[in-house]
Amino acid sequence: MDNALTTTKTALVLGATGGIGGEMARKLQARGWTVRALHRNAGNMAARPGRDRFNWIQGDAMQRADVVAAARGVDLIVHAVNPPGYQRWAELILPMIDNSIAAAQDFGARILLPGTIYNYGPDALPHPDEESPQRPVTRKGAIRVEMERRLQAASADGVRSLIVRAGDFFGPQAGNNWFSQGMIKPGKMPTAITNPGKPGLGHQWTYLPDLAETMMQLTEREEALAPFARFHMLGHWDADGMQMVNAIRRAVGNTALPMRSFPWWLLAPAAPFVPLFKEMQEMRYLWQQPVRMENTRLLEVLGNEPHTPLDEAVRTTLEGLACLPTPKLRDTTMA
């Protein structure tokens, strides 16, 4: 019998209501792990109908005592918590990773951190690997670099961590991302597609369930991981910048669905008042040149990277975002 399916291990998930945290929490639970989810209003989360049946723990990721108490006896801490709306990053992000490090050190847990491409500046592109220099040109990127620096420094004190870096993600429950906030509008059948990049310019995408499965498989191979382990995913490589657009067209059933360019020029005047626009504007450089991370190191450990076909992934995403008509139930009385 597969030991991964009968494990009695326990994970603490910080950010279980977010896209990556929620996907990873569900993946862990499906593999037989006990999942604790820290939340500032745990009672309400547990009482909501249809919510994921995690062990909701009352607490705040900003409070070290709360994180340490929730992490007692756990094997894994999934650090997927982010301030909402890109606000107060500078003052919140680093204290939260410090709290996870303290908890991991107390109980011997490994920290799992979903990584981003934001760590790399233009000098590392177009083919950054796990050892490429991290010289970001954005505030958010600088904070992500510092998070990873602290994890690496903590490895000298016995704190194990795992970072999995992927391209722009999308999925049926993916939260904030370029797909759902830039290309289409959730809750509405697409009448046009907004393309942040240029036709002919390659871009890297990752289907969120594939990311969670990759992180899960790496977690299950603890013996193959270094104390401070970093991996890149290949995901879906859109070689000409049009494969994602055309997959959306096929899912909608309209191969002539119009495509328009993203209005980058609108972001600058609104950026001082809309934090999301400011963050999007800072990340524009990642849409002005191809960026492709290779998964050589990942394949050395897993053999294969989990990969859902693009058309299937896009259709499932659009269905989850309520962008496709609800399938009509077959009338069984006519059978």
Image (tube, grey):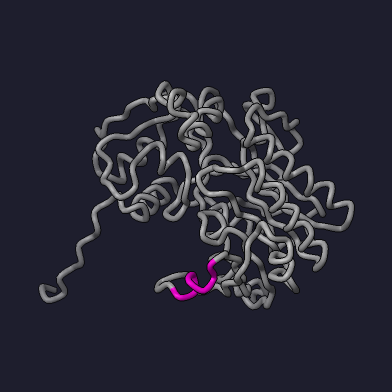
Write down the region rendered in magenta: 41-47
Which residue shows up at 35% across the image and 50% down it?
A: 318
Q: How far across and down, in percent of the image, does residue 2 sit? A: 64, 74
- Could you tell me residue 18's position as x and y percent? 52, 56
Nearer to me, 205 or 79: 79
Vertical relation: 289 (above or below) 156: above
Q: Between residues 122 and 49, which one lies in front from this camera angle?
A: 49
Q: Does the magenta stretch include residue 14?
A: no
Q: 158 above or below 12? A: above
**At 76% across and 36% down in the image, what residue appears?**
131
Q: In this view, does 205 lie above or below 158?
A: above
Q: Quadrant of the C terminus?
A: bottom left
Q: Can you give x and y, in whole percent of width and height, for residue 49 in the image? A: 40, 74
Closer to the camera in the image, 195 or 223: 195
- View extreme (right): residue: 156
Can you tell which quarter of the image residue 192 is in? top left
Image quarter hosting the N terminus: bottom right
Q: Residue at x 62, y 75 (%)?
A: 34
Number of numbered discs present? 0
Judge left or right: residue 38 versus residue 309: right
User: In the image, is residue 43 part of the stretch drawn in magenta?
Assistant: yes
Residue situated in front as seen by the camera: 114 or 166: 114
Q: Tell whether 77 sits left or right of 29.
A: right
Q: Main secondary structure of the magenta part?
A: helix
Left or right placement of residue 332 versus residue 212 in this view: left
Across and down, in percent, residue 142 comes to 69, 35
Residue furthest toward the left? Answer: 334
Q: Quadrant of residue 81?
A: bottom right
Q: Residue at x 74, y 44 (%)?
A: 148
